[in-house]
Image (tube, rainbow, N blue to C red):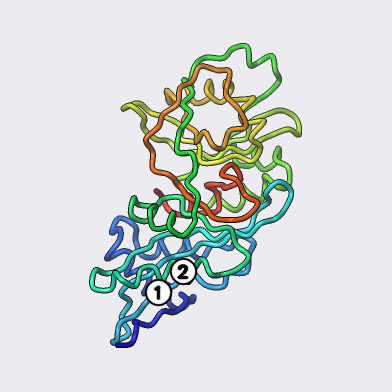
Amino acid sequence: MALPKLEPIRDEDLPAFCAFLHDHLNPSHPADIWAEAFRQDWGVKKPNHGFLIRDDQGEIVGGIGAIYAAYPVRGERRQFCNITSWVVLDAFRTQSMRLAMAVISQPGFVFTDLSPTAVVEQSLKFLKFTPMNSARTVLFNLPAPQQRFTGATVVTDPAKIEAVLDAAALQVYRDHRRFPWLKFLAVGKGQQRSLVVYKRATLKRLPSAEIVGFTNPDLFLRHLPLLGCHFLLSGMATTRVETRLLPGKSAWPHSELTGYRNKVFRGEGVTEADVQNLYSEYVALDL
């Protein structure tokens, strides 16, 4: 018996593939929102939007999405392929690994999955993906009046954010500001500013700032007390950030939470701290 046809997801296939994802993976994401996530232009020539399989009648019965991006890692521009939305109908489940192999056989990319299910995580570990530290550092947002003496400020007005960021951080801001579920600020002083991307979330039934990413880890860590004060005044009790993204421990009162599902990656010359949540399904979809 011939194997179901496996083929790359082209631009013209996106509406049907995203309708398949809406019907069989997550009905809360409209098909057009899914399609927009795959259509992002993030600095790399996309070979496809992932791969799909069709049955004898040409109907989509499974697929695995791919979001491509390029961003600097320690001064070197690297290309990333973010695997997402891997789903296969039960009758064709034996074809699942064909999809994964098709994606990771593409040369020149660092591969990531930032929202794997338990089954997907185990499957990707089998394919030599490395799990990342899943712990979160939680900062207790407190008043920080002494921070006014440092000269550092928090900038939230969109026009002013653009004015204070350097060219690299400004590009990150412009690449992500279209997503309404993301919030942005710039923290620092003078020309030393870090863009911070976050979401309003809930932790222990209290409002919390969930940090998605930032452009300067050292500045972010240095100004955590100022950020915490800002978030407190904005009605959020805590600030939560993935521990793997921090270059050290905060001196400000904090704790660490564990038990989150591991994100995974595969690529030479890259560590877990190099893998951003930005430029992925983690931001292109409201996860």
Asked if 269 appears above or below 259 in the picture, the reply is below
Q: Nearer the viewer, mark 2 or mark 1?
A: 2
Q: Name the residue rendered at 30%, 82% in the picture.
A: 55
Q: Nearer the viewer, residue 92 or 191?
A: 92
Indicate the position of residue 152 as horizontal and vertical percent values.
68, 23
Instruction: Tell me where residue 77 sits by quadrant.
Output: bottom right
Q: Mark 2 or mark 1, which has the lower sequence index?
A: 1
Residue 144 visible to an observer of this rendering: yes
Q: Name the residue rendered at 34%, 80% in the picture.
A: 54
Is the residue marked by circle 2 packed among few (<14), some (14-19), or many (20+) residues within 10 Å? Answer: few
Which residue is labeled 2 in the image? Answer: 101
Which residue is labeled 1 in the image? Answer: 52
Instruction: Tell me where residue 78 sits by quadrant.
Output: bottom right
Q: Nearer the viewer, residue 120 or 34?
A: 120
Which element is circle 2 on? helix
Q: Nearer the viewer, residue 136 or 131?
A: 131
Q: Is residue 178 left or right of residue 119?
A: right
